[in-house]
Each structure stands twice: as C-alpha cells, then as structure tokens.
Image (spheres, rainbow, N blue to C red):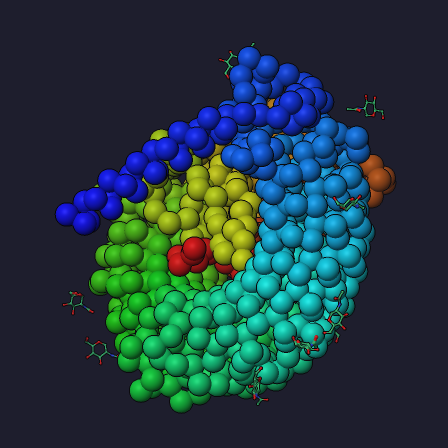
Amino acid sequence: MMVRCHCYFFCLIFVLLHTLASSTLNHCRNDQRDALLEFKDEFASLLELSSWNKSSDCCSWVEVTCDAKSGKVILLELPSTSLNSSLKPNSSLFKLQHLTKLSLYNCSLYGEIPSSLGYLSRLTILDLSYNALVGQIPASIGNLSLISFLDLSNNRLVGQVPTSIEKLFHLEWLVLSNNQLVGKVLASLGNLTQLYYLGLGNNNFSGNIPVSFSNLTKLKEVYLNNNYFESMLPLNMSGFQELSYFDVGENSFFGPFPSSLFTLPLLMKVFMGRNNFTGPIDFGNISSSSNPGLVLYLDHNKFTGQVPESISKFLDIDFSYNSFSSFGKSSEVLEETQIAQLDLSSNSFRGPLPQWICKLRSLDFLDLSNNSFSGSIPQCLRNLTVSLNQLLLSNNNFSGTLPDMFVNATNLKVLDVSRNQLEGKLPKSLISCNHLQFLNVQMNIIKDTFPFWLGSLPSLNVLILRSNQFYGPVYQPHLSAGFQNLRVIDISHNGFSGSLPPSYFSYWHNMARIVEQDYDDENLGNPRYGIDYHNTMEMVHKGVYTEFERIRRDFRAIDFSGNNFFGNIPESIGLLKELRVLNLSSNAFTNNIPQSLASLTKLEALDLSRNNLSGQIPRDLGNLFFLSIMNFSHNNLEGPVPQGTQFQRQNCSSFMDNPKLYGLEEICRETHVANPIPQKSEDMLEPKEQVINWIAAAIAYGPGVFCGLVIGHIFTSHKHEWFMEKFGLNKPRRFIKSIS
Ligand SMILES: *[C@@H]1O[C@H](CO)[C@@H](O)[C@H](O)[C@H]1NC(C)=O
Ligand SMILES: *[C@@H]1O[C@H](CO)[C@@H](O)[C@H](O)[C@H]1NC(C)=O
Ligand SMILES: *[C@@H]1O[C@H](CO)[C@@H](O)[C@H](O)[C@H]1NC(C)=O
Ligand SMILES: *[C@@H]1O[C@H](CO)[C@@H](O)[C@H](O)[C@H]1NC(C)=O
Ligand SMILES: *[C@@H]1O[C@H](CO)[C@@H](O)[C@H](O)[C@H]1NC(C)=O
Ligand SMILES: *[C@@H]1O[C@H](CO)[C@@H](O)[C@H](O)[C@H]1NC(C)=O
Ligand SMILES: *[C@@H]1O[C@H](CO)[C@@H](O)[C@H](O)[C@H]1NC(C)=O
Ligand SMILES: *[C@@H]1O[C@H](CO)[C@@H](O)[C@H](O)[C@H]1NC(C)=O
Ligand SMILES: *[C@@H]1O[C@H](CO)[C@@H](O)[C@H](O)[C@H]1NC(C)=O
Ligand SMILES: *[C@@H]1O[C@H](CO)[C@@H](O)[C@H](O)[C@H]1NC(C)=O
Ligand SMILES: *[C@@H]1O[C@H](CO)[C@@H](O)[C@H](O)[C@H]1NC(C)=O
Ligand SMILES: *[C@@H]1O[C@H](CO)[C@@H](O)[C@H](O)[C@H]1NC(C)=O
C-alpha cells in the first residue's frame, strides 16, 4: 500500500514537473535566435538548415539544443554540413557564448580559426576536425578553460601549438593529428593530468618526451607517430597503468627498449617501427592473463640479439628490418600461442628454421624472407598450412626440396620461396591449394617439367618459375587448357623447349579480357597481397588504416625468354588483348612476327630479340600507342622499320644485328652517323636485360609492386632500388586482421 502510494505521489510530481519543463523548454531567446539566423546567413543557403526560420522556436531547430531553463543555446552540432566558407572573426557564432558543445566536423570550413573562439569560454567540447582550416591555432584557445575534448585534426594548421594550451587542465581528449604543426608541443602538456587520449600523429612536431610526462598517468591512447620527436623513451613506464595504445612509429626515437612497457596490464597495440631503437629486447614479465591480442610493431629499427620467447603471447608481430639474429628459448612457452601474423623478414637470422615455428598453429601470415636461414624447409610446416594465408620464405639459403606439405593448405593464397637453393621437383600437393593466387619459385635450382597440373587451380594469377632448371615442353595437347586466370607468367631462363601450336595462347582468358564481375566479387577473399585487384589493401599502420595504392589490376605479362622454344610465335598471341608486356627473347623462334601482335593495343613492352625471326616487322605495330619499350635486335628481320613515334623514339640498339632492316637513319642518327644500321659485333655495348628482368624484379619485392608500375621507365640495373624507393614497397603488403 505504502509503495503504491509513494509511486502515485512521485508520478504526479513528475507529470507536473514535466509539464512545467515543457512549457519553458521550447522557448528560445531572441538574441540567441538572431545570432543563429545571422550565423546561417554567413553561408550559402543550406537545405539542411531550412528549419532555421522565424516560424518556429529556435530551440526546436535541428542541430540546436537549448538550456531548458535559460533558453540559451548550449549545443550546436553541424557535422558533415557543407558550410563551404571561412569562419569570420565577427561571426555571430561567437555571440552564442553559452555553448558548451560545438561541432563543425567535416563542414568544408577554410580560412583561419578566428581568435574570437576565445569568447566561447564555456565550451567543454570543440570539434573542428576534417576541414581545411589553415594558419595557427589561436592563443585564445587558452581561454577555453573548461574544455575537455578538443579535436582540430585533419586540417592544414601550421606553426606552433600555443603554450596557452597548458592551462586547459580539464583536457581529456586532445587531437591535433594530420596537420603541419611544428615545435615542441610535449613540453606544454605535462600539466594536463586528465589527458587520456593524445593524438599528435602526422605533424612536424619535434623535441623530446619531458619528465613531466610521467604525471600523465591516465593516458590510454598515445599517438606521436610520423613526427620528428627524438629522445629515449622513459625506461620506467610502469606508471602508465591505463595505457592501451602506444604509437611512436616513424620518428627518431632512439635508445633501448623500455622493458617495463609490456608489463602494463591493458596494453593492446604498440607501434615503435621506423625509429632508431637499438640493442636487445627485454619484454619483462608479460602476465599471461592479460593482453589478449597484443599487437606489436618494432619494424625498421636497430634491435639486435634474440627474439624473446614471450612473443608467443602476442597476436601480430612485425620485427622486420632489424638485426635480430636468433631466438630465445621458446619451445615450451609456445603451447598456447595465438600469433596470427609473424614478420621476421629482413633480419640477420641464420641457421635452420627452429622447429617451434611449426607450433604456431594460428598463423595466417608468415614472412621470414631476407634472412640467412639455411637447411631444409622443415616438413612440420605442414602443421601450419591449414591456417596460412601467405608463406614468404624468399631470399634465404634454404636447400633440399620444397616439402610436399600442402595437402591441407586450402587457405594459402601466396607462396614465395624464391631466391633459395631449392632443388628437386615442385611438390604435387600444391594442387590442393585451391585459393592459391601467387606462386613464386624463381631463382632456385628446381629441376622439373612444366607443372601443367597447376592449370586447374582456379585462382592462380601469377606464376613465376624464372631461373630454375625446368625443362621439356610447355604444351601438350590434352593438358594445356588450364590457367584461365593467369595474369602474369614468367617461365624465363629455364630449359623449356619445343614449339607452340598457333592456338597456344587461346585459353588464357584473363589476359584476353578483364572480367569486371571478377573484381566486384566481394568473395574474392582477403586482399592481403598485391594480387587482389579490386579491393584496396589496408593495413593498420601506425594506428590508422592506410590505404595502399590500388593494384594496377589491368597488369598482364608473359615472359618466356631465355628458353629453347622454336617454330612460329603462335598467332593466338593476338587474342591476349590485355597484355602489357611480352618477352620472347633469347629463344629460337623462326619465321615472321605474327601480324596479330598489332592487335595488342595495350602492349607497353615487347622483346623479340635474339631469335631467328625473319620477314618484316608488321607495319601496324607502329600504331601501338603505348608500346614504349621494344627490342627486335639479333634476328634476320628485313624491310622498313615501321613509322610511328614509338618506333622513332627507340634506341638504335633495339634493331641492331638485322642486316636487311632499313629506315633507321632517324633512330640511329645520333649514335651511329656513319653506319646507321649496326651490325653484329660481340664487343658492341648493349643495354643489358633491358626488358627481360623487370617482371621478376617487381615480383621479388612483392607483387604489390604491380600496383603502381609505370612501364617504360624501368631501364636501369638499379631497378630494385628504384622500385623500392618509388613505391615504398620494400616488403609485401598485408593487412592485420585484428583491428578495432
Ligand atoms: C521553417 O521551419 C519549419 C520547421 O521548423 C518548416 O516546416 C518550414 O518549411 C520552414 N520554412 C521555410 C520557409 O523554410
Ligand atoms: C564529410 O561529409 C561528406 C558529405 O558532406 C561525406 O560524404 C563524407 O564522407 C564526410 N567525411 C568524413 C570524414 O566524415
Ligand atoms: C564552395 O565555394 C566556392 C566559391 O566560394 C565554389 O567555387 C565551390 O564550388 C563551392 N563548393 C561546394 C562544394 O559547394
Ligand atoms: C563582419 O565583418 C565584415 C567585414 O570584415 C562585414 O562585411 C560583415 O558584415 C560583418 N559581419 C557581421 C555579422 O558583423
Ligand atoms: C576569454 O573569455 C572571457 C569570458 O568570456 C572574455 O571576457 C574574454 O574576452 C575572452 N578572452 C579572449 C582572448 O577571447
Ligand atoms: C614538414 O616536414 C616535411 C617533410 O620534412 C616538409 O616537407 C614540410 O615542409 C614540413 N612542413 C612544415 C610546415 O614545416
Ligand atoms: C605546471 O606544473 C608545474 C609543476 O609541475 C608548475 O610549476 C607550473 O606552474 C604548471 N604550469 C601551469 C601553466 O600551471
Ligand atoms: C607531477 O605532479 C606532482 C603532483 O601533482 C607535482 O608535484 C610534480 O611536480 C609533477 N611532476 C612534474 C614532473 O611535473
Ligand atoms: C617505476 O615507476 C613506478 C611509478 O611510476 C614506481 O612505483 C616504481 O618504483 C618505479 N620502478 C623503478 C624500478 O624505478
Ligand atoms: C637513425 O640514425 C642515423 C644516424 O645515427 C640517421 O642517419 C637516421 O636518419 C636515423 N633514422 C631515424 C629514423 O631517425
Ligand atoms: C605436427 O602435427 C602432428 C600431428 O598433429 C604432431 O604429431 C607433431 O608433433 C606436430 N609437429 C610439431 C613440430 O609441432
Ligand atoms: C590434414 O587435415 C586432416 C583433417 O584436419 C588431418 O587429419 C590430416 O592429418 C592433415 N594432413 C596433413 C598432412 O597434415
């Protein structure tokens, strides 16, 4: 009874209060309304704000909230409204001095932030991010003494952060990332003890981490990435008990690894890559209960010594580009491992691959390339292949045969064992790799016949057998119908032989046309590697998603050079309309160059040199607009060189040693005035491997290179470096599966 009675009483009170409140709620003050209308008038007419008119109470307007009692505007939120204007110093916005929250996020604002911002001294939340604001942050920002959330990120702000910021004691969330700010900002922040989110990434900040930072014990997420900060990290970081996200990547931090870092109980993600950290790593006591899914990036530093056994506690590991040389005692610790991605590439590891690698049963990415591992590739890797997506072992000293370990490797998309000393045959179990897209075994000593049986792999895009001891025919009547999805095939520099029937190329549908639906198929799988063309690759790098270059999805190439093929060049080559690169050089092809070549309108590089081709160069090749690299030298070609700018731009040497070829006066004028048609001569200097090597060069540094490739500029023998610099692609791209 009592209960009911009480309830009734309170309900009554509530209704009364509510009625009262409602009667005052929608009651805008005229000065506030006028200020809002003036503010609206500062911009071109906005559909979004059509409700801002005098026929209704301003407290009911969209994106406006009033204080119920006073009728003053306290919240103004116009996110993603295209204001497309600057904020004037005398903007009526600054009359709304009771605002506690102002969001003009992504409003196409440009111009400077007016110093009148300081009038809005009651603000607790200010979001001006994702605009095009320029100039300096006004010192009057120090007037916003109640502010706890300040986001000016993703603008074009320059200059130093005003020191007045150190008075904003309530700041919990400070984001200035993605501007062009300079100076030693950190020194000003030591007093802001409430800070838990500090985003300064992608600016030009410099200086060091001041001692006062140790007072910022509430920090949860720290992004100092991509700046010029330089100092050691505090060795004792155990004060930062809340820290979960720590990103100092791409700076000039140096000194030893702070061993206390990984004892922090809430730590999730650590990015320390691309700095100058040195010495061995000691992770201290990582408690096994904590840190499920710890991600760690320590790549591109100068760490040395052992990889600590406790890495088994992590989820994703990138230790690439350091000088690690060995592993700590690891075997028993690893039983409960959850590592999904392990990148130890480009270090100084040597000797046999440790067996415990085979216990990392949840691995989906394993990159051990560019080390000096030796001995055989252990059979037990088969225990990993069930989950593995990418297996990258290139550029080591592995010997013996590639084990027949792929029976269960149904998830494998990328296999790169190039640049080792592997011998014997290709393992037949590769046939189980239903999702295999990329297979690179180049530069080993594999002695096998052509793997016709791989032709049935439905996703195989890229096949590189270059520089091995493969032999025998690449055509057999009943076997050659596969490989319908090939985009790149490089079987150069082997001992393949035989003639190719006219129809040889007619099955390679993916070189004949680009099937749009292939690319739009969301089910193509994870775009881990540069061979998934539709999706862009993403990687959690330095705490943000970085979208990598779109794959040049139209790239198609054939390299059969340096074998013993003879007979005619198959006429069906003309069907491969998407082909960009064709290299048939250094074989024994005879007879005419097929006219059908002229229908390869997208061709950018063509090398037919060093064969026994005769007859004329088809005149229509002169119409191939993109054909910027070509080589016809060392054949028996005759007649006129085709007209057309691309031909006229060639180096004289592209035609040399074809005694009956004429029309070269223009082309050869500069270098050989006296004898325009160079004849065969052993000591004549020729550009070496002009075309023939670059597919492989690209592949060697990860097929991601294909994405931005500008064919026609790749001549030099420094192409490896060139690629790496040009595209920043010195290792395979991948993305990390455990984000957010
Ligand atoms: C004024 O705002 C009301 C909504 O508050 C809207 O229904 C009306 O169409 C607006 N008038 C004009 C002229 O935009
Ligand atoms: C910004 O707003 C536009 C619409 O005006 C929207 O298309 C875009 O996605 C927004 N960008 C961000 C980063 O929110
Ligand atoms: C922004 O305004 C400029 C002129 O001030 C105009 O040229 C441009 O088209 C406008 N942009 C948008 C998205 O309205
Ligand atoms: C702001 O100042 C400009 C001149 O700088 C003037 O044209 C404009 O009318 C002023 N706006 C307001 C709202 O006072
Ligand atoms: C700071 O805020 C106070 C109170 O609103 C105001 O009187 C003063 O003019 C402001 N100063 C600046 C520099 O904006
Ligand atoms: C920031 O650094 C980059 C790279 O060094 C430089 O190009 C740019 O001019 C710098 N910007 C400012 C505002 O200092
Ligand atoms: C910052 O804190 C130091 C002591 O830690 C104090 O001396 C200094 O006055 C403070 N700065 C401000 C702007 O309050
Ligand atoms: C850290 O804070 C304490 C008290 O809050 C203060 O005494 C000390 O000076 C501060 N240390 C630094 C380095 O600012
Ligand atoms: C590290 O710092 C914490 C608090 O910040 C302190 O309690 C601890 O004694 C320090 N440890 C060492 C080894 O100095
Ligand atoms: C590392 O240090 C070397 C010289 O000690 C310097 O040349 C290099 O630029 C530094 N790298 C970074 C990322 O700071
Ligand atoms: C590989 O798996 C087999 C069967 O599951 C197991 O017997 C063997 O010990 C595993 N090898 C390693 C090195 O973990
Ligand atoms: C392949 O997987 C099946 C079932 O998971 C398992 O029984 C078999 O031992 C595996 N084979 C190899 C060679 O690992």
Q: Residue furthest left?
A: 1
Q: Is 588 left, or right, of 276 in this rendering?
A: left
Residue 31: image location, x then y, percent: 68, 25
**Foreground: 360 or 544?**
544
What residue is shown at x 35% (from left), y 54% (from top)?
413
Q: Position of residue 601 (x, y in %)?
A: 54, 27
Left or right position of 404 against 247: left
The residue that appears at 35% across and 59% down in the rendered structure is 389
Which residue: 39% across, 57% down?
Answer: 737
The quadrant where ligand 10 appears is: bottom right
Q: Is residue 704 above or below residue 664?
A: below
Residue 59 pos. (x, y %): 54, 27
Quadrant in the rendering for residue 168 = bottom right
Image quadrant occupied by the C terminus: bottom left
- The answer to whether 155 appears left or right of 596 in the picture is right
- The residue at the point 57 percent across, 72 percent down is 217
Residue 212: image quadrant is: bottom right
Residue 86 rendering spot, x and y as whole percentages: 74, 30
Quadrant position of residue 40? top right
Whether 629 is drawn above or below 400: the answer is above
| Residue 661 appears in view | no
User: From what the image shows, is residue 384 above or below residue 284?
Assistant: above
- Circle count: 0
Residue 142 in view (yes/no): yes
- The one of 334 and 379 positioned closer to us in this rendering: 334
